[in-house]
Image: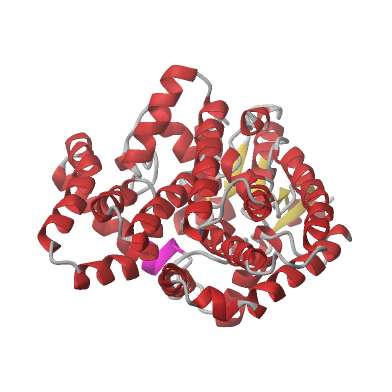
Amino acid sequence: MSRALTSIYYIEDIDSLRFALSLHQYDVLNLQPHFPGYPLFCFIAKLFYLIIGNRGLTFSIIGGISVFFCMYYCLKISKISLKSKVGFFIILMIFINPFFWLMSNRYMPDLLGLAVALGALYYLTVRKRLFLGFFIFGLLPGIRLSFLPLLFVPIFSNLLKSKKKFLLVTFSLFGISVWLAPFIYLTGFDNLWSIGLKHTHGHFNDYGGTIYTETNWGSRFIHLFKSVWADGLSGYWSGRSVVTIIISAYLIYFFSLSLKSFQKIWKDKSFKIILFSMIIYILWIIFFQNIIHKSRHVLPIIFFLILFMSLGQKFNQTRKFNPYLSASFFPLLLFITCTLVIQHKKPSAVSQMKDYLLKQERPIKVVTIPLINYYLNTNKVETEFYNVENQEDIFQLNNSKNLGNYYVIGNFRNLLNNSIELIYDRSFYHNPYVNRMWSRLDIYSMNSNELHNEQ
């Protein structure tokens, strides 16, 4: 219910647009959604959409269910009772965490992917239902492929120990077939193979924000830490509310309890496996994910840190003032969460810009990057689009005699010749702690310097 009340009813970024389009027509060849297609997630979302008939509510209900299972598996993994004070700590840490809340309202598969990965992680580490763990491992790529490295350690560990390797692999293959068979049927094997090769190469070498395209190691580590500390845990960062300074003090204290009890925590074999899994995952996103512009990749790390803090609470329950500290901590966290969630309900910068352009007198012409052009075109902004990454478009622009009604989104002064002047029009903005993508967009109009000089 809480997630349904905070549903959003606009398209906040390009990734959300692709998943929204997939509800109406699933077509990976036309990037609805982008490769790897997330066929199982899209199938689940489509079912909910057919029943509910509302796009925002569809994704919010899936998000709410995902939050529930994240809480459930955190309790199971930590072996903490729901009825205990620490169990209540876990529930609140996940339920009102601003990052979890925002992700539960977004048109994205990340939170459901995390819930499914945690389910597999639990069954693989407790070794009670290994077949179920391997089956869920097979399902996961159909929901969130990039979370798969989370399960490599327990998967290989169990394969080495088990005498039923063939059966375990069979269950994984069965899980894969659940989403891969209909995926091939809908897309065609040749088409799927071709687009798979194209986008895999593109992700790692062109547009995926990996170490090959974003080579500044310092920037990658800073953004990783910022995403975890500020975005994920509401810790303080320059320019943020004073409340986040107080939250930071609480977080440091909670972590200190966990570090103090680390020897006790380390004795749990499940925790060891999960820690090694997290190390593998962190290396994976540092090298091969867009951690600079998309903080959602740290979602599993946030869960792990909440688990770690909860275990610290578990082994320090004799401290009489701990419950009082927790009781005073959560209202502060809820304040930050409510602020961000309310801001999330308002249109993002790109959505505001779309509304602005729709109101302009036609005809207009838009000059910007391909992704924004695609966003505007899909949202029925009828215009002539110029791609700043296309040299033919830039050549045509530089030789145009009539510069009226041109809107340049982004400062591309370096691409234009000296006879063209960019004039600042306005900016659109949303809080980057709500969504890092395109949190500020500047619009410019164009004028001829030669004409200006003649006058």
SS assignment for the magenta stretch, majority: helix
Residue 48 at x, y = what percent?
44, 25
Residue 45 at x, y = what percent?
42, 31
Q: Is residue 364 above or below residue 164?
A: above
Rendered residue at 59%/48% (across/down): 367
Determine the image quadrant of residue 183: top left
Q: Is residue 313 left or right of residue 44?
A: right
Q: Which residue is at the front of the view, 217 or 278?
A: 278
Rendered residue at 40%/64% (across/down): 150
Q: Which residue is at the front of the view, 82 or 376?
A: 82
Quadrant (top left/top right/bottom left/bottom right) for the N terminus: top right
Q: Confirm whether the magenta stretch covers residue 203.
A: yes
Q: Is residue 263 above or below residue 420?
A: below
Rendered residue at 36%/60% (across/down): 126
Determine the image quadrant of residue 219: bottom right
Residue 267 at x, y = what percent?
48, 76
Residues in magenta? 202-208
